Image (cartoon, rainbow, N blue to C red):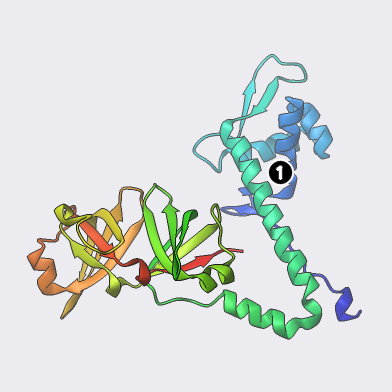
Amino acid sequence: MSESELKVMGSLALGKDEQHVLSDKRIALLEHIAQCGSITQAAKAAGLSYKGAWDAVDAMNSMFDEPLVATATGGKGGGGTQLTGLGVRMVDAYRALRREQKRFLEAASSGIADFDNVYQLIRRLSVKTSARNQFFGKVTAIKKGPVNIEVELTLTGGDRIYSVITHDGLETLNGEVGSDAWALVNAAWIILTLPDVMGKTSARNSLLGRVVRINTGIVNSEVVLQLDGGNTVSAVVTNESVEALGLEPDVKICAVFKASSVILGVTD
C-alpha cells in the first residue's frame, strides 16, 4: 500500500466509562426515537432489540442529572417516547463534534503523503504557552484605524476584552466578526485597582471581579479574580500592593491592562 492510499481514521465517543457513553450507534438511536416517537420502532430502525434499545436509553439517561429520553405510557407500540430538551441538545452537540472530527481527519488524510510536514504542524498546534490568562470567546467588533486595528472579544458571560493588532496581523489570522477566538494576557501585565478607579485609566481593558485566591510569595503574590461571567483573571503584584489594596477573598477589585498587551488568536 502506498502513502497516497493511506487515510487517517477515528471514532468518537463521549462518556465516563465504557457503559456510560454516547457513541455513533446510541446517537443514531436517539435520532430514531425523535423521528418515530416510539422505542419499539426506533429499536427496529437502529438494528437493536427492544431490550437492547432500552438498555442503551437507561445507560444514556444515567449519564446526566436529567434524562435524554422521556416516556409517556399508553402510546402505540409500548408508549410514546421522545427526546427531552437535553436529549436534543446532546444530539446536536455530538453531530457538531462529528463534523469537526471529519474535517480534521480529511485534512490529515490529504497530507499523509507528506508526513514530515504534518508532524511539524501537529507539534505547532500542541505548543504550550506561559501566559497565565487564556480567554476564549467570539469576535464581536473590529475597528480599523490607519495604523492598527482594535478587535473586541466577547467572553462567555458577557465580559469584553480588547486587543490592538496590526492590519497584517488581522490578515494573517483571517479574523472576522463571529469568529471563535482566544486571547492571552501575561499575569505580570495586569494592574489591580479599586473599583472606583474603573474606567478612569487610559488602559482599554477593565474587568471587575472578586478575589477568590491569593498565592503569597517572598516578594510578589498571584491574585486570582473571578469575573461575574465565570472567567478567572490572574495578576502578579507585589506583597505591598496586596496589603495597600486590602486584598483578601471576596473583595471586589478591578483588573486593568492595555489592549496592546493582549495577544489574539483566531481558530481556523
Is residue 157 positioned above or below 126 on the image?
above
Is residue 102 positioned above or below 20 on the image?
below
Q: Is residue 164 visible?
A: yes
Callout 1 amino acid: Arg
Question: Residue 259 in the image: x percent, y percent?
Answer: 35, 66
Question: Residue 71 in the image: x percent, y percent?
Answer: 64, 24
Q: Is residue 194 left or right of residue 232?
A: left
Question: Residue 166 in the image: x percent, y percent?
Answer: 47, 72
Residue beneath the point at 74% across and 68% down: 107
Q: Closest to the observer: 44 or 148?
A: 148
Image quadrant where residue 68 sits: top right
Q: Mark 1 — residue?
A: 26
Is residue 137 positioned above or below 59 on the image?
below
Which residue is most to the top?
Answer: 74
Q: Closest to the observer: 60 or 148?
A: 148
Is residue 41 positioned above or below 153 on the image?
above
Which residue is most to the right?
Answer: 1
Residue beneath the point at 75% across and 41% down: 28
